[in-house]
Amino acid sequence: MRISLFAVTVATLYSDALAFTTKAFHRPASSSLSATVEKVSKTKVPVFDEVCDTTGVTLKRFMSEVAMLNPELTELAVLFGGVDTACKALANLVKRSQLPSSETLGYEGNVNVQGEDQKKLDVIANDVLKRALRFTGRLGVLASEEEDTPVDIMPENVKKQEIVIDESEKYVAVFDPLDGSSNIDAGCPTGTIIGIYEHDENCDIDENCVGEECTELEAACLANTLQPGTNLVAAAYCLYSSSTFLALTLGNGVYMFTLDDQIGEFVLSNPDVKIPESSNIMSFNSANYDNWDQPLKDVVKGWETGTGKSQTAFSSRYIGAMVGDVHRTLLYGGVFGYPGDKKNPNGKLRLLYEGAPMSFIMEQAGGLSTTGTQRVMEIIPEIVHQRVPMIMGSKNDVEEIIEAYDNWKQ
Ligand code: AHM
Ligand code: MG
């Protein structure tokens, strides 16, 4: 009986499968307001017409049904198994970091390639995520905020056949293991950001190649990470806050999962995250206001006084940790940004592993993400740790900023 019920469920799932066609829109700078079709994804998404009351739809079930409906994504589903494990482990580490016995707060004593002090948890989180993804065997190259250069996923002392599963090394992962880490010591929200691209499977990298020892071809393969956001196959973030959340997109909308500590699983809590088109919340480090570009200053002033396009007076909310600020922005509507300014023309956030994956999620939820003059998703990174000015959020409000930049005569 159970078997036939299961068979019916699976059959229903297949027949009800929706092949959404998702289009991401953004108006290129200096063009008319008409939207440009940039990306079409035909990933089939599962429909869950039978759900266990106790477990709900877990991330594992979700990904395995995505893989059944889209066999070409089977290996991506395996990779998400690593993401699932890493986010749970990191949530636990972040939670326990407040205990005196954990000894994971404070600085590691190293400075990363961008001149920033590394916190102990930054380093631990990088290690946890790297290993979780590597052990899926689906990863060719990764780039992380905490690594100086992209690294071949094979460590020097591990031969390929010793990898747990090593079938195709199909993907490239870019990630910020613990974003907003300045919040850690105070126990405020932090997060992990992950972007996944396809890897060139013809890349054959000598496992001993490091930096200048790599041949040109090997260096080019490692540079596989330098792809624009429009090439992303998937993006996800985990938020460590009052609950642990995992939001992901496979190019067909945004799914949000909440960690159920009692069963140790991420459970689908919002199957179609859509950001409100207009808002009344802005989220910037406004201490930088005086150094911003004039169009942004003008729009923000209009929002403060309720004299902007929407004639709405805005409130300000700023956690100082992008994952938390973007999560709230997705759910409540709003505009989050770390714009360029006179001191730092490219702002603070990193294009590859912060800007592009979060922009992919934002666009898939119906929002926009821009530098002010360019769609963030279209920028081709030149270096791994490249910074990008970024303003993202509710469509109508971000469009107000884009229009102001369009009309700006520098
Ligand atoms: P990090 O990756 O070193 O943690 O820095 C990124 C963080 C973002 O999460 C956040 O939006 C921003 O830095 C906050 O910067 P500031 O303290 O200048 O407002
Ligand atoms: Mg970061």
Image: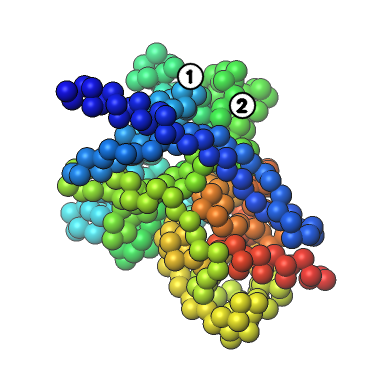
Q: What residue type is disc 1 on?
A: Ser
Residue drawn at the location 38% of the way across and 38% of the way down:
47
Q: Which residue is mark 1?
A: 168
Front residue of 129/396: it is 396
SS of the residue under disc 2:
helix
Residue drawn at the location 47% of the way across and 60% of the way down:
330
Please, is residue 59 above or below residue 403 in the view? above
Q: Is residue 408 visible?
A: yes
Q: In x, y percent, where is residue 364?
A: 53, 49
Front residue of 118/249: it is 249
Q: Is residue 290 visible?
A: no
Q: In x, y percent, where is residue 327?
A: 43, 59
Query: Counting other residues with Cα less than 10 Å from the Cα at mark 1, is it few (<14), some (14-19), or many (20 or more)?
Result: few
Ligand 2 has an atom within 8 Å of the beta carbon of the residue at disc 2: no
Q: Which one is earlier in the sequence, the residue at label 2 or at label 1?
A: 1
319 vs 312, left or right, is: left
395 vs 145, left or right, is: right
Q: Which residue is mark 2?
A: 221
Q: In x, y percent, where is residue 226?
A: 63, 38
Q: What residue type is disc 2 on?
A: Cys
Q: Residue 88's quadrant in the figure?
A: top left
Q: Residue 341's quadrant in the figure?
A: bottom right
Residue drawn at the location 62% of the way across and 48% of the way down:
24
